[in-house]
Amino acid sequence: MRQARPYSGIFCGGVSARTGPHALPLARIKKIMKRSAGEAAAAADGGARMISCEAPVVFSKACELFVAELTRRAWAATLDGKRRTVHREDVATAVHNTDLFDFLVDVVTADTAGGTGGGGHDGDGDGAL
């Protein structure tokens, strides 16, 4: 009898056979995949009409790993600031200090510049996530 490999549990139903052990809704991921494939293929001859059942599962796991890594690095920035609440500045620091997240630099810079103009930032938790 064949032994299960470490990642074979990704494709098996965990909580229920329909949803599985995924933190993100697979139907929403599938909807995003179809919409972005349609936008990218607007110049070409059509978008993705069919998506295999494994693709959203893999995207869900990739998103979970991405969020976990970004959270770990933002938490490290929070601890460096001797705080226990993650602020948007901590996420921005994590993005700026990690080459892996270079694609987010423009998003975080625009968000940080636009987000602090309104009510001011006096350190009372205005920027807490």
Image (tube, helix red, strand yellow):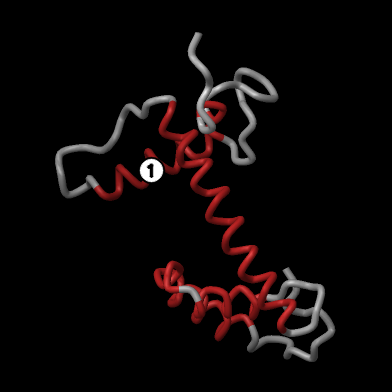
Query: Is 12 or 50 nearer to us in this picture?
Result: 12
Quadrant into which the C terminus falls: bottom right
Residue with the mark numbered 1 = 35
Horizontal and vertical percent position of residue 8:
51, 27
Q: Position of residue 37 (x, y in %)?
A: 31, 43
Vertical comparison of 5 with 96: above or below: above
Q: Residue furthest top?
A: 1
Q: Is residue 57 above or below residue 74?
A: above
Q: Which amino acid does label 1 sit on?
A: Arg
Looking at the rendered structure, the number of numbered marks drawn on it comes to 1
Which residue is rendered at x = 49% and y = 46% of the image?
A: 62
Residue at 53% in and 55% down: 66
- Quadrant position of residue 113: bottom right
101 lies above or below 5: below
* SS at mark 1 in the image: helix
Residue at image position (56%, 22%) is 12
**Around disc 1, counting alpha carbons within 10 Å, would you say few (fewer than 14), some (14 to 19), or many (20 or more)?**
some
Residue 79: where, in percent of width, then height? 74, 77
Q: Position of residue 6 (x, y in %)?
A: 54, 32
Q: Is residue 3 above or below residue 111?
A: above
As drawn, the residue found furthest toward the right would be: 124
Q: Closer to the camera, 32 or 16?
A: 16
| Near-viewer residue (8 or 65) | 8
Give the side of residue 40 with respect to residue 29, left or right: left
What's the residue at 57%, 48% (across, down)? Answer: 64
- Relative depth, front residue between 68 and 19: 68
